[in-house]
Image (tube, rainbow, N blue to C red):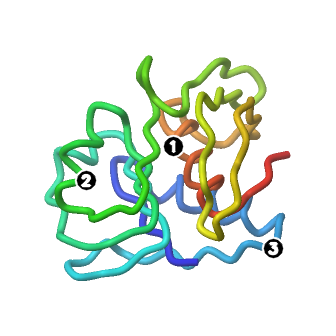
Amino acid sequence: MRIAVIGEGKGKAARYLQELAAQQGICLEQVPLEKGGVYDVVLAGPMAAKAEVPDCRTYALVAYGKDAARLSHCLQAQTVITYGTEKSTLSLSSTEGGGMVSQQREIMDISGSAQPIGEIRLPEGLPSQWVCGAAGALLACGWKGM
């Protein structure tokens, strides 16, 4: 599965995603975001909307709610998963013991399976501003939680 991670702190987030995905047999190929590229998932972390973003395509764009509109102009996404605001698909409900993420709406993963509404617990290892985005990227890849 091809995934690009953009934003401040992307290296740590990319390693974290690979480790969790591998636990369920999901192989993530971390690739840079390039003009004309095609990706399964693009995770846009903090400050990603302020960067130069090339035109490309992705199945799922996972972006901070206020950044999603700007990023979706460059990243042609089949689905957009938002996080971090009141009306977002994902919001952080607790940072205790890693992070508890509240999923407000069903998410369709890359294989077409519905990821049901509920709460997702992620282990420690990421700054709080990345936790919801990481959950969205993992769910879009077909991750089933812990």
Residue position marked by numbered label 3 in the rendering: 25
Residue beneath the point at 28% across and 31% down: 66
Describe the element under mark 1 as helix, strand or loop.
helix
In the structure shown, which secondary structural element does the residue marked by tag 2 occupy? helix
Which quarter of the rendered picture does the C terminus lie within? top right
For label 2, the residue is 72
Q: Could you say which quadrant of the image residue 109 lies in?
A: bottom right
Question: Eyeballing the image, is 75 above or below 7?
Answer: below
Q: Are marks 1 and 2 in contact (CB under 8 Å)?
A: no
Q: Which-is-in-front pick, marks 3 and 2? A: 2
The local crowd at label 3, few if under 14, some if 14 to 19, many if 20 or more residues have their Cα within 10 Å, is: few
Identify the image quadrant of the N terminus: bottom right
Separation (CA) of disc 1 from disc 3 = 20 Å
Q: Earlier in the sequence, mark 1 or mark 2?
A: 2
- Amino acid of disc 1: Gly
Q: Which residue is drawn at 63% across and 32% down?
A: 103
Image height check: is 40 above or below 107?
A: below
Residue 102, how many percent across, how many down? 65, 26
Relative image position of residue 4 (x, y in whole percent): 42, 67
Label placed on residue 133: 1
Dot 2 crowding, Cα within 10 Å, few <14, some 14–19, many 20+: many
Q: Position of residue 110 (x, y in %)?
A: 59, 67
The disc labelled 2 sits on which kind of residue? Ser
Q: In this view, does 48 lie to the left or right of 91?
A: left
Q: Which amino acid does label 3 sit on?
A: Gly
Which dot, 1 or 2, sits closer to the camera? 2
Q: Distance between the residues labelled 1 and 2?
A: 15 Å
